[in-house]
Structures are given as C-alpha cells and as structure tokens.
Amino acid sequence: MPPVSEPTLFLRHSEPLAARMRPRTLEEFLGQEQLLGPGKALGELIRRGDVASCIFWGPPGSGKTTLARIVAHYTARHFEPFSAVTEGVARVREIIKAAEDRLKYEGRGTILFCDEIHRFNRAQQDAFLPWVENGIVTLIGATTENPSFELTGALLSRCRVFVLEPLTEDHIKTVVRRALEDKDRGLGALGLTIDDDALALLAREADGDARRALQALEAAAEYLAGSSTARDRPVLPITASIISDALQKRFAKYDKGGEEHYNLISALHKAVRGSDVEGSLYWLARMLAGGEDPLYIARRLVRIAAEDVGLADPRALSLTLAAKDAYHFLGSPEGELALAQATVYLATAPKSNRVYTAYGRAMQAAEEHPAEAVPLHIRNAPTKLMEELGYGSGYKYAHAYDEAYVPQEYLPDLLRGQKWYEPSEFGFEKDIKQRMEWWEQLKKAAVGQPLT
C-alpha cells in the first residue's frame, strides 16, 4: 500500500469512478444520437429548458440517470433522486411537500427522478398522478422494462416515453479513454495506459453499459496502482488479462445484464422442470437477493406453466398469473412470497410438454402449407351469395348430437389425418387422452371401421 504521505486517487475520492465521470452537459454525454442529435426532439427540449414529465426506457448503463440530471441542469430545477427499490410512498410525500414549498417560496420547480419506476405497483405509480398533473413536480422515471407492460395507463398517458439504446463499443472506448485522461475526476493522475486488446475487450464485455466498463476499469487501476507504488517504477499498462480478471471479480456475484443473469434463470427453469423444490427455491432466492426484477422471474414462471406443466395441470397457468398480479398488488418484498408459492407449485406439479410440442408441429405445418383453403362446410356464410356458393353447407352443429360430438373433418384436405397433440398419462392429460380415444372410436364407428 502507498505511504500515507502519498495518498492515491482512490483515497482522495470517496465516489466510485462511474459516479465521478458522469457527464454533466449534453456536450459530454455520449450516445443516444437518435434522441439528442441535431434537430431531435429531446435534445431541443432540454436546450430550451422545456422538458415535461417523461419516462426513460433503456438498458443498464445507457445514461438514464445521467440524462435526468442533465435535464435538471439545463432547466435550473431542483433535482430530487428517488429509488423505487429502497424507498416508498411516504418518502414521495416528503419530496412533494418540499417541492410545494420550493415552488411557493422560491419559484423553482422540482424534477423528481424515480429510478426503476417499474418496481412500484400500480397503486404506488398512481400516487404520482395529482402532483404531475398540477405541476408540483416534473416526473422523470427510469426503467429497464417495457413501460407498456410495467407502468399504468394513467401514468403513461401523462408521460412521454423516450427509448435509450445500448452504447456502442466506440462509445465505451471513448468513455474509458476520458476516464484515463481526466486528472480531476478520472484516473489521469495515475498515468495509466491501456493497450488496444484490453480496450477492445472492455468495450465488448461492457455490453453497452458504461457503468460496467468504468467499474472494471477502476478495479484494474486499483490493482495496478497498488502493485506499482515506488517512484522509480513505472505503472504497467492495463492489459487484456488484467481487464478479464477485473470483470470476473467485479461482477462475480450477480449481473442482471450479463452471463450470470442467464445462468441463474436457466438454473431456476431446469430445477422447476426437474421437480426439485429445494433447487427451485434456492435459484429463485439467489435471483431476488441479487436484485433481479421480480416481474422478469414472474414472466418465466408463466412460461414454465405453459411449456413444462401444460395440461397435466391446467391450474398452473392461472396460479402463476395470479402470482404475477399479487406481486403487482403487494410490491416488494411481500409480493415475492407469491412468486415462491408459484415456484413450489410448478415444481411439484405433474409435467407435460405435449401442448408445446403439438404447437410446434402445427406451426411447422402452417409454414409448409400457408395457403390451404378452408373447407367449405366450416366457412362463415353471412350473406345469401355465400350460402349459394356452398359456404357452410353440410356443417354439423356438434350440440345437436348426442354427447355434443359428431365426427367431422376440420382440416384442409392435404392435412387430413394429421396427429399433432398426443396427451401424456400424467395429471389431467390422462383424462384428456381417454376423451380423445373415445372420440376416435366414434369416428371409426361412423365410417364403419372396426373399433379397438
């Protein structure tokens, strides 16, 4: 460690590098040319200081928070950050009261920046409405999730949505170079260099996330600064090997946008499919503890219900949808118990992928035979002309027959006799299989074939 008489940059700065290097003006801001370029709406609104309530939707590290701060800077409004993960409606009321006083006594508006606004349930989101409508605050929400699914219609109708894109590798390289050169806010005082391979690796692995790139760069710089402290020994360049180690150590726990994100959701899915309750609960807990969006998990549970449980237990789909709604209603952390309940239910339910397989076969048939004519007897005949042309002629109304069933062909001629859905022997599908076998016997009897 360097002597106390020679403090390093890391001792002098308490803020992380990513926070120190946050752009403060539109000129410093990188990326989002589709929003901020010449003549683009958001850029012009910011420069005029005329930004109304809006939602910034984009991936991690794309600049949502930074852009909100820049809006506040250009509009001379007070900036009040707020996290939907760690704070609740009570904190919102405190902010609103201060905003009312600020507007009344100082004539200064307030930008309420709500990070991860999708984490609020619908009732919590609607709490913003009166203050947005009467102009007490300008709401800027940031979300990584599709606002159409995660935000209420009432809130969306009062906010303009701006879509942010991941930064390009060239953008990330520029961010890194700036941090290495800046002697005030960055790492310039350390005299560090980075070779081309390391820079390319960092830009690629950052996956469009400037924060991730700067966190890894800071970890690499800390390592090099700590190993090269003597005055007569030059600081080594940052190599690809050092960057690789920094990326692994920095993000070993959990990264919602990286490989571990997909590893953990894969582990959860496979544990549920494999009917392992403990494994299912463990991977669920790992993801929630790591900061994964519970609604992302809820969507995967709904998929499992349809794909891996299917009609072996038709209630599974309703239960997982109810768990998703319960989370929306309760929010975090109470709503997470509903996800745990759904996870255990799915893990212990009988399994069948027969609907999933049948749908795949039907899709293949539709792609291979996209223009087969609908048989005349099952066509709609709303007009006299269509009746005269034979539309609907010969159609047998099932409810007019015993057992509400009558043998009849519903597929185009070319596909007659196809069997795509073959129910399993598990759960409710066992009953479905018996019913389908009975219908098959009725078909054979109708055409004089021997029964089996």
Image (cartoon, rainbow, N blue to C red):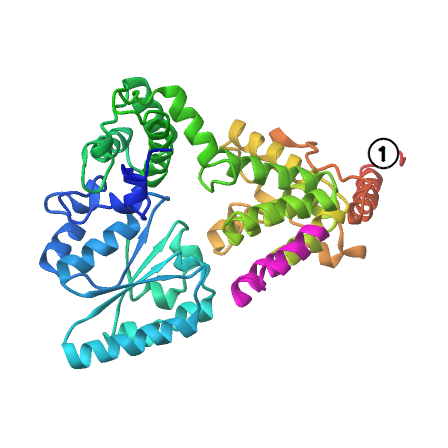
Mark 1 packing: few (<14 Cα in 10 Å), some, or many (20+)?
Answer: few
Name the residue nearer the viewer: 218 or 197.
218
> Please, is residue 401 above or below residue 96 in the view?
above
Q: Secondary structure at mark 1?
A: loop
Q: Amino acid at mark 1?
A: Gln
Residue 196 position (above or below residue 64): above
Q: Position of residue 297 (x, y in %)?
A: 56, 49
Name the residue at 14% across, 56% down.
Answer: 45
Residue 339 located within the stretch drawn in magenta = yes
Residue 201 vertical position relative to residue 134 in the rendered view, above or below:
above
Question: At 47% across and 33% down in the image, what residue appears?
Answer: 249
Which quadrant holds residue 219? Answer: top left
Question: Which stretch did the figure color magenta?
Answer: 321-345
Residue holding disc 1: 449
Residue 179: image location, x then y, percent: 24, 35
Between 405 and 80, which is closer to the camera in this rendering? 80
292 relative position to 84: left or right = right
Residue 166 on image: x %, y %: 32, 38
Q: Horizontal placement of 257 versus 271: left or right?
A: left
Q: Is residue 283 left or right of residue 77?
A: right
Report x, y in % for residue 118.
42, 58
Judge by depth and name the residue closer to the eye, 451 or 133.
133
